[in-house]
C-alpha cells in the first residue's frame, strides 16, 4: 500500500508510520512540525518520505493524495494547554485542515481514516461512552471547548461526505493514548507526572484528583487504526479506541511515584488557577469498546502498569544527557 499520514511526526503518527513501514507500505508524511518533532521519525527517513507543510496548503495535500492509496489524517491541534492558549489556531487547523483533506481524498476517491477524540463527548456525567451517545458541550464563551467542538465538526463533515458523495471514510475516537515519544509540554498528564516524579518535584494534580480516565498504549491503538483502514467494508462509521481500565488522577500520581521510586508528593491545584476562571472538566471518561471489538476483534493488551513502565523508561532516556550524546553520530 501507498499511505499518506498527516501529522506523521507527532506522537501517535510516528508510531503509525513505523508500523506501516514495518509491514512494507510506502509511506509519505505531511507535518508542519508545530507540535510534532522530526526526531520522532528520523530513524525512518530511509523508509518514508517527509514533507514539511500544513494540511491548510491545499496544493500540497492534493499532490500527495493523488499518488497514494489511503490517507490517515492525524494532523490536529491537541493538548489542553495549547487549546486554551491558542483557540483560533485550534479551530482553524482542525476544521479547515480536515476539510482540505476530505475534499482532496474525495476528488481522487482515496480511502480516508480520520482520528477524532473522546473530547467530543463533552462534559456528560456518564461513566462509559458509546459511539451513539449524545454530546454535552460547554458554552462558546469557554474556549476550552473549541477543541471538542472543532473535532465534532470534523466528524459531521466526514459523515456528510459519506452520505452525500459516498466518500469512503472511517472515524476513530481515541481515548487518552500514551506511550514512548509523548511529551507533557501541552498538558499530557502521564509524561508530565513522570517527569515531575523523576525530578522529585511535587506532582501537580488538578481539582480534587478524583476524576478518572482510561489510558491506552500506543502499541495497542495503532494496530487497531490500521485494521479499521484495512477493513474495506467499513465506511461512514465511528469507532471508539482505547482502554477501559479506569484510574483516578490521584491514584495515577501515586502509582507513578511508587514505580519511579520518587520522593515526590502531591500538589493539588484548582482548575481556575491552572487554566483561568470557568474551566470545565469531566469527571469520568471510559470508552465502550463493544463496537470496535465486533468490527476487528480489538482488545487492549497492555496494562496501566506496563504503560507507565514504558513511559518512565522513555522519559529517563530523554532526560539523560549522556544517553542523548551517545545516540549522536
Image: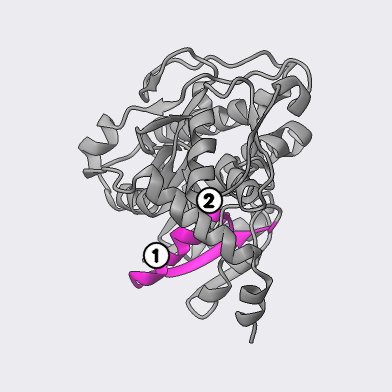
Comparing 33 with 276, the one in front is 276
Give the residue at x 33% y 27%.
288
Dot in front, 1 or 2: 2
- Picture quadrant of residue 239: top left
- Picture quadrant of residue 151: top right
Between the residue at mark 1 and the residue at mark 2, the CA separation in whole angstroms equals: 36 Å
Q: Secondary structure at mark 1?
A: helix
In this view, 314 is above or below 295: below
Q: Position of residue 73 (x, y in %)?
A: 51, 49
Q: Residue lying farthest front?
A: 263
Q: Are marks 1 and 2 in contact (CB under 8 Å)?
A: no
In this view, 118 is above or below 190: above
Q: Quadrant of the C terminus?
A: bottom right
Q: Which residue is mark 1?
A: 20
Q: Provide the residue span drawn in magenta.
A: 7-33
- Picture quadrant of residue 1: bottom left
Q: Residues within 10 Å of mark 2 (few under 14, many from 20)?
A: few
Figure label count: 2
Report whether residue 270 is seen: yes
Amino acid at each position: 500500500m501507498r499511505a499518506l499520514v498527516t501529522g506523521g511526526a507527532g506522537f501517535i503518527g510516528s508510531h503509525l508510520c513505523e508500523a506501516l513501514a514495518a509491514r512494507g507500505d510506502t509511506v509519505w508524511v505531511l507535518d508542519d512540525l508545530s507540535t510534532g518533532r522530526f526526531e520522532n521519525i528520523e530513524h525512518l527517513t530511509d523508509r518514508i518520505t517527509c514533507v514539511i507543510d500544513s494540511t491548510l496548503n491545499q496544493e500540497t495535500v492534493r499532490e500527495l493524495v493523488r499518488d497514494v492509496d489511503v490517507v490517515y489524517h492525524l494532523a490536529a491541534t491537541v493538548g489542553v494547554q495549547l487549546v486554551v492558549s491558542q483557540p483560533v489556531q485550534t479551530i482553524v487547523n482542525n476544521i479547515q485542515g480536515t476539510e482540505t483533506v476530505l475534499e482532496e481524498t474525495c476528488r481522487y476517491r482515496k480511502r480516508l481514516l480520520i482520528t477524532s477524540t473522546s473530547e467530543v463527548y463533552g462534559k456528560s456525567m456518564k461513566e462509559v461512552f458509546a459511539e451513539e451517545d449524545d454530546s454535552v458541550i460547554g458554552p462558546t464563551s469557554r474556549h476550552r471547548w473549541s477543541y471538542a467542538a472543532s473535532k465534532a465538526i470534523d466528524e459531521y463533515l466526514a459523515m456528510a461526505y459519506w452520505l452525500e458523495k459516498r466518500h469512503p471514510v472511517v472515524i476513530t475516537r481515541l481515548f487518552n493514548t500514551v506511550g514512548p515519544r509523548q511529551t507533557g509540554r501541552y498538558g499530557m498528564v502521564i509524561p508530565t507526572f513522570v517527569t515531575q516524579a523523576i525530578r522529585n518535584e511535587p506532582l501537580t494534580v488538578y481539582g480534587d484528583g478524583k476524576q478518572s480516565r482510561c489510558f491506552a498504549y500506543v502499541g495497542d491503538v495503532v494496530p487497531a487504526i490500521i485494521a479499521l483502514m484495512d477493513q474495506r467494508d467499513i465506511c461512514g462509521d465511528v469507532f471508539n479506541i482505547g482502554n477501559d481500565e479506569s484510574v483516578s488522577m490521584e491514584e495515577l500520581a501515586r502509582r507513578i511515584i511508587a514505580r519511579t521510586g520518587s520522593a515526590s508528593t502531591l500538589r493539588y491545584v484548582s482548575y481556575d488557577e491552572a487554566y483561568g476562571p470557568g474551566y470545565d472538566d469531566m469527571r469520568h471518561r471510559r470508552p465502550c469498546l463493544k463496537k470496535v471489538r465486533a468490527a476487528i476483534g480489538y482488545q487492549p493488551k497492555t496494562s496501566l502498569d506496563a504503560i507507565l513502565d514504558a513511559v518512565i523508561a522513555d522519559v529517563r532516556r530523554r532526560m539523560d544527557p549522556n544517553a542523548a550524546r551517545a545516540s549522536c553520530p
